[in-house]
Image (cartoon, grey):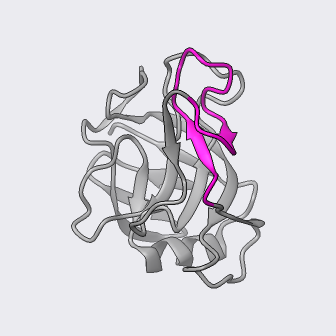
Amino acid sequence: MITVFKNGELHFKNKIYKCALGRNGIRKEKIEGDGYTPEGEFSLGPLYYRSDRIKKFKSCHKFIPIQKNMFWSDYSNGIYYNKLLNFKDISFESLYKINSTYDLILVVNYNTKPIIKNKGSAIFLHIAKKNFSPTSGCIALKKICFIEILKKLNVSDTIKIVLN
């Protein structure tokens, strides 16, 4: 299990990693666009990667290449809310970014079964910016640390995000 704490520490396999969290911290009652990382324990979903920037490595997760037409809907009133799309919804997050933050994305299965409108979307583990600046709700790690975790992570592992 991956455990994430409000002080920006991620614990996995007896090791501590620095991570960035949502700009407003961690919160149980998350809503769309609030800048919080959701509290709770969640399973992990697909692993997406930029094949033009990341060389495949040994991982239990199947690598899914990110294409230019891949988006994640954050339009809470739409039928595609919190889902991967190959077209732009009214409001969306592009997975194919100019910067390197989405070169690796591991989906956190938050608000997925069932999807509840306005509860929050596009919660991922991804690569942090150099200064570990806050995210919009995701958990971001240094690239080398993220790869190290992905090499040891099992598909059955979960992520627990805690307030204390």
In terms of secondary structure, what is the magenta stretch mainly? loop
Which percent across, then down, holds residue 47? 67, 60
Query: Is 133 part of what is drawn in magenta?
Result: no
Toward the viewer: 53 or 47? 53
Query: Is residue 152 depicted above or below 156 in this figure?
Result: below
Q: Quadrant of residue 9?
A: bottom left
Q: Quadrant of residue 99?
A: bottom left
Does residue 98 appear to the left or right of 151 in the view shown?
left
Which percent across, then down, holds residue 32? 43, 24
Does residue 100 appear to the left or right of 135 in the view shown?
right
* Residue lying at 42% horizontally and 24% vertically, measured from the top left: 30
* Residue lying at 58% horizontally and 38% vertically, measured from the top left: 88
* Residue lying at 42% horizontally and 52% vertically, measured from the top left: 139
Query: Is residue 115 depicted above or below 49 in this figure?
Result: above
User: What's the magenta region?
Assistant: 68-89
Which percent across, then down, holds residue 84? 67, 42
Toward the viewer: 46 or 38? 46
Q: Quadrant of residue 112?
A: top right
